[in-house]
């Protein structure tokens, strides 16, 4: 299509829109879903609704399930993401895509995919070639369109292909053949190139009926009635008729001038047609023709597919997302009327009278047709209240003035012109035709006679602001004033005064404010206030419950119709069915705004309901019977965080004892915003006696742990827009009795207890018997022993007397020996003290020989020394010495500990100093060799008698001009550990031979010297084996692995901190266990 043709099509569409929408006055609301609302793609090709109410959408990013709130994507569940069509049958969804036909089985909490027919590039008896449209006829045959063929899948699973040849080959990637059936079940098909076919069941073939004129390409096909058909073509929607010979006749244009992609018949008989860039039309049947109506806000959308949901809404898949089209419950568009803030409304001559700036009327000019006309302007003010009586119109303004307008003579008269009286809140006629006016501030209550000549104020009768006036059916006048105590007054005509009839004090944390008052059909008074809706039955005043919203919600206007109370609130327009049921209407029902003036709710003379809002009127001609909200479904259940799997097919869900049950649920509404849920749970036999929870918008709940038993969880949902509470969703679940609470367990406990008691009694009896036998034997033995002893005692009595003299002499000797022992003990104590003092002195000597912390700090700024002798003096020692260009340091472990080890440490220290200072030996391995030879000379004169020696690690460190350090190391059974800047720990082993032992005497030690360069910050460690060999109370050693891991963990920390941590760990590990050996670790940071 060229630019000129596109321009002509757009102008034609616009003219059609303007013309058709003056004919049809239906209001539609159009909502759009796409990537901005969470969908994976804006390009949508097909839509269906499953049996649970979920909407399935074929997008360019795969198939999607939508419940009004949650969007579940199934990108990799199908063999191909290139979906052509969706078809729903018996609760299952069939999907055609480039790689065949798949079936989706959907449950609220789980979805299963399976391949029905595989696809490929060539067709066989069991495969499809790029399938497109899917259709199922009345005989349960599936018909699947291919490029130039139609494939039938029979109920028995057999597949047969009907090829139409290349003349019927489609040039579209999405459409080839379209299907429809007539009222008799006859199957018809159209090809993309415009041929029409009818299925001949007897001959098992498609008979060609002809070809559409003008070479139109066909995108969709629909039988309407009798022999009439609609086709959606590339030039719009056309209708044709089949004559008696099944020939195509009366081919004529219906609507549109560009590509029409989809046709869908709704339940009410209307047919919806979708176009590329020309919107969506509702085709209203009229005889053999149709009257098209363009749906507003659908232009410039490329419609691909149309479907109707169970709630009657129309959904369109387009290349710009999904369009949801709903017929509005309320009418909002009127001829010549420009929407604005409506201040007040009142019934008037079959229409209404209202105020925006001046006073205007919506006059009824035909069936459901109204036109707007201005009656008169006020003086730079608006009317806050209007009354009518015949041709006379009374209007009260926001400045407290009252106007009387005669619509015949056009005469306007002003009353109450004091500007400080506040605005007119309410007005009412009494049965004598007088006008009563309630004004704020200083206005009070005023009566104007019917002829307008007499004006009287009743301001002194009211201490608070009069808010609302009502004249009852029997002529009584009641006035509400904004007071918590004296809020209701009644007019005493005889006394010409108002008297209080308030019965109770109304509780409120806020200053009380009344907004409207009506008389109910049973004679009670109903008040709309800022603390809720109040009912006055001439005995008590009570708050009416509002099921689903807070009872203290502010009511702005009231109306009673057919026994149902209508209320405007911030939550929307409420239709109160009873104490337990409330229907909510809001913007999604067609009401233009949720902001309402006080008192802006009336019923006209024809029974229609008018609602004033901040954006114009909402008109409801016929009150629809509210329908239940779609049933809520549990979409996920988990117990203690573990998913319970699919609930469907399970009569009862088993829940573990002492477990939490978490449920997530949804009522499929579109949109799901503002849905209320309430639930209850308990024993199945008691559930009807359990109160429902307070309604809220949460769509998940966590049930607490319950006692073992069978329970039921019940759930209800309620949506806005004329919806009642849904039917119950019931989940039966059983808290499983744990095995230790089962009857068999209790029987086992009793049997076990009986066995234990029986065995205990038997053991006790047996032990008692054995004890008795034992005691009897003891008694017999003791009796015999006593007899023998008695005889012996009598025999020895004389001996004892004789020995008594000897004992006296021995006692004197013992006393003498005791004095001698005490003298020896005193000598030993003196000797022990002398030895202890000697050891302490030896410790001082050893400490004086060892380098001090200051010596080490002069050489190494950052270092630590962990030195812990086993006894007073140590067989471990450490040493350091500096020359003109290098620093040496060593750690050694001598054989033995205590005094022998200390003597060896003195020898080793002396030999190290001698080798470095006096002999000027500079290489670590040569120094160790010299120490080795010195030990041999110092401690042994015979080769086979030497068992003394030591292990030693010796380092030489030299700082290089570039800031790095040269390290030379030699070790005799002692390693060096160092940690480089990268944090990696390296262990350099020493020679296997120690210094001074016989085995190392013959010949050289063959020490290996290691030399390497390290950067500044490198950490070096020399140590004896005492730390890693220390055991705890479980005889478990620290070990070298743990030592190295600790050094890696501590790397980067100051060396003093590392030494402290090692010492604390040693103390904690050792506990009360004795120290096994001397312990020395010296660490330095270069």
Image (cartoon, grey):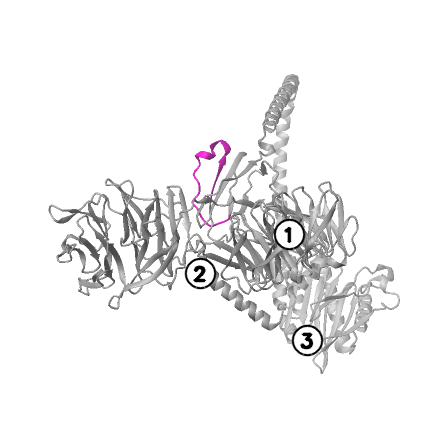
Q: Secondary structure at mark 1?
A: strand
Classify the position of the N terminus by image quarter: bottom right
Q: Between residues 121 and 686, which one lies in front from this camera angle? A: 121
Asked whether the beta carbons under mark 2 and mark 3 sit within 8 Å of each other, the answer is no
Q: Between residues 246 and 170, which one lies in front from this camera angle? A: 246
Say whether disc 2 or disc 3 marks the residue closer to the N-terminus. Answer: 2
- For the question of whether residue 1057 can be seen, the reply is yes
Classify the position of the C terminus by image quarter: bottom right
Residue sticking out furthest to the front:
244
User: Is residue 688 found inside the magenta-colored segment of the image?
Assistant: yes
Q: CA distance from mark 3 to mark 1?
A: 73 Å
Q: Secondary structure at mark 2?
A: helix
Q: CA distance from mark 2 to mark 1?
A: 36 Å
- On the image, numbered disc 2 is attached to which residue? 22
- On the image, numbered disc 1 is attached to which residue? 86
Say whether disc 2 or disc 1 marks the residue closer to the N-terminus. Answer: 2
The numbered dot on residue 1042 is none
Residue sticking out furthest to the left:
495
537 to 452, vertically: above or below:
above
- For the question of whether residue 834 can be seen, the reply is no
In terms of image quadrants, where is residue 774? top right
Q: Between residues 511 and 564, which one lies in front from this camera angle? A: 564
Say whether disc 3 or disc 1 marks the residue closer to the N-terminus. Answer: 1
In terms of image quadrants, where is residue 929? bottom right
- On the image, numbered disc 3 is attached to which residue? 1016
Q: CA distance from mark 2 to mark 3?
A: 91 Å
Per the rendered image, the range of residues in magenta is 678-699
What x and y, as percent, mark residue 676? Answer: 46, 48
1000 to 831, vertically: above or below:
below
């Amino acid at each position: 299509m060229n630019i000129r043709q596109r321009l002509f099509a757009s102008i034609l569409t616009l003219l059609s829109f303007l013309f058709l929408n003056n004919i049809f006055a239906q209001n539609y609301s159009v909502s759009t879903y796409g990537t901005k609302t969470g969908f994976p793609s804006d390009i949508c090709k097909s839509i269906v609704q499953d049996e649970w109410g979920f909407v399935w959408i074929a997008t360019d990013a795969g198939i999607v399930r939508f419940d009004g709130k949650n969007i579940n994507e199934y990108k990799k569940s199908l063999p191909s993401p290139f979906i052509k069509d969706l078809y729903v049958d018996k609760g299952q969804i069939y999907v055609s895509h480039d790689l065949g036909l798949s079936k989706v089985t959907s449950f609220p909490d789980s979805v299963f995919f399976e391949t029905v027919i595989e696809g490929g590039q060539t067709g066989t008896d069991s495969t499809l070639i790029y399938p497109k449209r899917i259709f199922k006829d009345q005989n349960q045959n599936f018909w699947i369109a291919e490029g130039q063929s139609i494939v039938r899948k029979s109920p028995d699973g057999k597949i047969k292909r009907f090829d139409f040849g290349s003349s019927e080959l489609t040039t579209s990637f999405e459409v080839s053949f379209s299907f429809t059936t007539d009222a008799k079940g006859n199957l018809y098909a159209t090809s993309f190139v415009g041929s029409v076919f009818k299925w001949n069941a007897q001959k098992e073939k498609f008979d060609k009926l002809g070809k559409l004129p003008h070479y139109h390409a066909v995108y969709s096909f629909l039988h309407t009635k009798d022999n009439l058909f609609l086709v959606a073509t590339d030039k719009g929607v056309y209708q044709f008729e089949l004559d008696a010979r099944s020939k195509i006749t009366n081919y004529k244009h219906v609507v549109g001038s560009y590509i029409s992609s989809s046709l869908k018949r709704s339940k009410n008989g209307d047919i919806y047609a979708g176009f590329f860039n020309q919107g969506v039309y509702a085709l209203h049947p009229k005889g053999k023709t149709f009257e098209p109506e363009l749906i507003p806000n659908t232009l410039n959308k490329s419609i691909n597919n149309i479907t109707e949901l169970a709630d009657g809404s129309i959904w369109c898949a387009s290349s710009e997302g999904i369009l949801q089209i709903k017929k509005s419950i309320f009418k909002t568009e009127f001829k010549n009327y420009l929407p604005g803030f409506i201040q007040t409304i009142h019934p008037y001559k079959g229409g209404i009278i209202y105020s925006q700036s001046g006073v205007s009327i919506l006059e009824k000019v035909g069936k459901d047709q109204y036109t707007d006309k201005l009656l008169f302007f006020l003086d730079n003010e608006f009317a806050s209240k209007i009354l009518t009586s015949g041709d006379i119109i009374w209007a009260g303004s926001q400045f407290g003035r009252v106007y009387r307008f005669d619509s015949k003579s056009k005469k306007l008269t002003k009353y109450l012109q004091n500007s400080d009286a506040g605005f007119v809140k309410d007005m009412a006629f009494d049965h004598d035709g007088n006008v009563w006016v309630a004004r704020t501030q200083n206005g009070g209550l005023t009566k104007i006679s019917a002829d307008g000549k007499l004006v009287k104020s009743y301001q002194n009768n009211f201490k608070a602001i009069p808010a609302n006036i009502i004249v009852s059916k029997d002529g009584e006048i009641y006035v509400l004033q904004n007071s918590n105590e004296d809020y209701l007054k009644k007019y005493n005509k005889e006394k010409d005064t108002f008297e209080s009839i308030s019965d109770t004090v109304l509780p409120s944390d806020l200053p009380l404010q009344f907004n409207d008052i009506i008389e109910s059909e049973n004679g009670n008074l109903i008040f709309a206030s800022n603390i809720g809706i109040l009912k006055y039955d001439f005995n008590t005043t009570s708050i009416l419950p509002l099921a689903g919203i807070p009872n203290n919600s502010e009511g702005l206007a009231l109306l009673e119709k057919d026994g149902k109370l209508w209320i405007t609130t911030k939550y929307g327009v409420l239709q109160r069915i009873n104490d337990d049921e409330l229907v909510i209407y809001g913007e999604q029902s067609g009401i233009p705004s949720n902001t309402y003036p006080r008192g802006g709710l009336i019923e006209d003379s024809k029974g229609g309901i008018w609602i004033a809002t901040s954006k114009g009127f909402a008109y409801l001609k016929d009150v629809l019977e509210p329908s239940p909200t779609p049933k809520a479904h549990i979409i996920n259940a988990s117990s203690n965080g573990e998913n319970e799997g699919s609930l469907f097919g399970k009569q009862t869900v088993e829940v573990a004892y002492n477990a939490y049950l978490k449920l997530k649920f949804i009522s499929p509404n579109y949109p799901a915003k503002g849905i209320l849920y309430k639930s209850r749970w308990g024993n199945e036999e008691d559930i009807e006696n359990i109160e429902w929870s307070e309604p809220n918008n949460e769509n998940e709940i966590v049930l607490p742990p319950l006692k073992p038993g069978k329970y039921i969880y019940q759930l209800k949902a309620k949506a806005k827009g004329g919806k009642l509470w849904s039917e119950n969703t019931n989940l039966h679940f059983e808290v499983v009795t744990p095995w230790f609470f089962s009857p068999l367990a209790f029987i086992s406990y009793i049997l076990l207890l009986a066995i234990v008691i029986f065995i205990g009694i038997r053991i006790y009896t047996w032990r008692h018997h054995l004890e008795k036998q034992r005691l009897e034997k003891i008694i017999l033995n003791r009796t015999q022993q006593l007899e023998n002893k008695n005889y012996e005692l009598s025999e020895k009595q004389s001996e004892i007397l004789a020995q008594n003299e000897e004992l006296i002499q021995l006692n004197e000797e013992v006393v003498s020996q005791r004095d001698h022992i005490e003298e020896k003990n005193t000598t030993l104590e003196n000797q022990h003290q002398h030895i202890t003092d000697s050891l302490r002195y030896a410790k001082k000597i050893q400490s004086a020989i060892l380098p001090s912390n200051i010596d080490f700090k002069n050489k190494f700024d950052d270092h630590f020394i962990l030195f812990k002798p086993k006894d007073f003096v140590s067989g471990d020692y450490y040493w350091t010495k500096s020359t003109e260009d290098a620093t040496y340091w060593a750690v050694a472990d001598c054989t033995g500990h205590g005094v022998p080890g200390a003597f060896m440490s003195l020898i080793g220290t002396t030999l190290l100093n001698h080798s470095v200072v006096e002999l000027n030996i500079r290489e670590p391995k040569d120094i160790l060799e010299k120490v080795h030879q010195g030990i041999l000379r110092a401690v042994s004169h015979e080769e086979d008698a030497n068992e003394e020696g030591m292990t030693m690690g010796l380092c030489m460190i030299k700082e290089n001009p570039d800031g790095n350090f040269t390290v030379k190391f030699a070790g005799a059974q002692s390693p060096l550990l160092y940690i480089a800047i990268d944090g990696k720990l390296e262990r350099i082993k020493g020679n296997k031979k120690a210094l001074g032992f016989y085995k190392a005497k013959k010949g050289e030690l063959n020490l290996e010297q290691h030399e390497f360069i390290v950067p500044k910050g490198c950490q070096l460690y020399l140590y004896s084996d005492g730390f890693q060999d220390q055991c705890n109370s479980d005889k478990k050693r620290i070990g070298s692995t743990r030592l190295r891991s600790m050094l890696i963990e501590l790397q980067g920390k100051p060396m003093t901190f590392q030494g402290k941590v090692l010492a604390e760990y040693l103390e904690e590990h050792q506990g009360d266990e004795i120290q096994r050996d001397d312990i020395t670790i010296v660490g330095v940071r270069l």
